[in-house]
Image (cartoon, grey):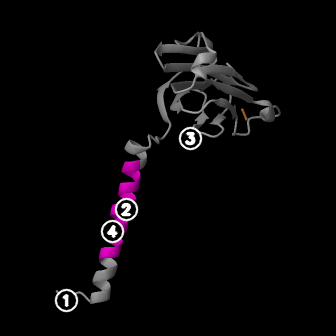
Amino acid sequence: MHIDRLEGLFLWLAAGMLLLFAGAVVISVFGMGIQLPSIVDTVNPTTLRQEAGFDRPGIREIYEGRYEVYMVVSQFSFDPKSIEVPVGSRVTFYLSSTDVIHGFKVFDTNVNIMVIPGQISEVTHTFDEPGDYQFYCHEYCGSGHHNMQGVVHVVEASDE
Ligand code: CUA
């Protein structure tokens, strides 16, 4: 079969681009730790505050440098709305809503997730730089939407 020289060139170019994009995905997932937020479980939104984890919203240290946060999201607040971790901490957030769809976006990070009634959303982030990381709701959820915000305080370990 005869393949024209230019046609062959474009075939190789297309194959090269496929490899490049596949490589970019592999590097972002395994090299940079960028992940898609995932839905871990379903839950009854009307009894969310009685469900395991969500019955005591807040931050817990699992082991040194590793934390989990259970957060109840509802019109128009995050519970908890303020957490504090030492710099370098890896934090897994579990979120769910008691009413409508909300959003959870932590400024200056890749944490950006929808919070859907009936579902538990999970996202993990390592806070490598000290500072105050504001988070806020980015899904319009009603008249108090603009008031839904909070903050992750990332402090130097010596400040503990
Ligand atoms: Cu909650 Cu917008």
Identify the residue under disc 4. Answer: 16
Tell me which numbered mark, 1 or 4, is placed earlier along the sequence. 1
Question: Which residue sits furthest front?
Answer: 158
* Element on which disc 1 rests: loop
Question: Magenta: predominant secondary structure element?
Answer: helix
From the viewer's perspective, is residue 34 above or below residue 51? below
Residue type marked 2: Leu
Quote the CA–CA distance across marks 1 and 4.
21 Å
Which one is earlier in the sequence, the residue at label 1 or at label 2? 1
Mark 2–mark 3 distance (CA, rounded to whole Å):
22 Å
Point out the tag, 3 or 4, that comes first from the N-terminus. Answer: 4
Q: Residues within 10 Å of mark 3 (few under 14, many from 20)?
A: some
Q: Residue 135: image x %, image y %? A: 68, 32
Which numbered disc covers residue 20? 2
Amino acid type indicated by mark 4: Gly
Check if mark 4's residue and mark 2's residue have beta carbons within 8 Å.
yes
Q: Position of residue 151 (x, y in %)?
A: 69, 27
Asked whether, in this view, residue 121 is left or right of residue 84, the answer is: left
Q: Secondary structure at mark 3?
A: loop
The residue indicated by pointer 3 is 110
Q: Nearer the viewer, residue 102 or 7?
A: 7
Q: Rounded to the nearest whole Å, what is the CA distance between mark 4 and mark 2?
A: 6 Å
Q: CA distance from mark 1 to mark 2?
A: 27 Å
- Tell me: residue 10, above or below residue 43: below
User: Relative to 58, is 34 above or below?
Assistant: below
Q: Earlier in the sequence, mark 2 or mark 3?
A: 2
Instruction: Specify the quarter for ligand 1.
Output: top right
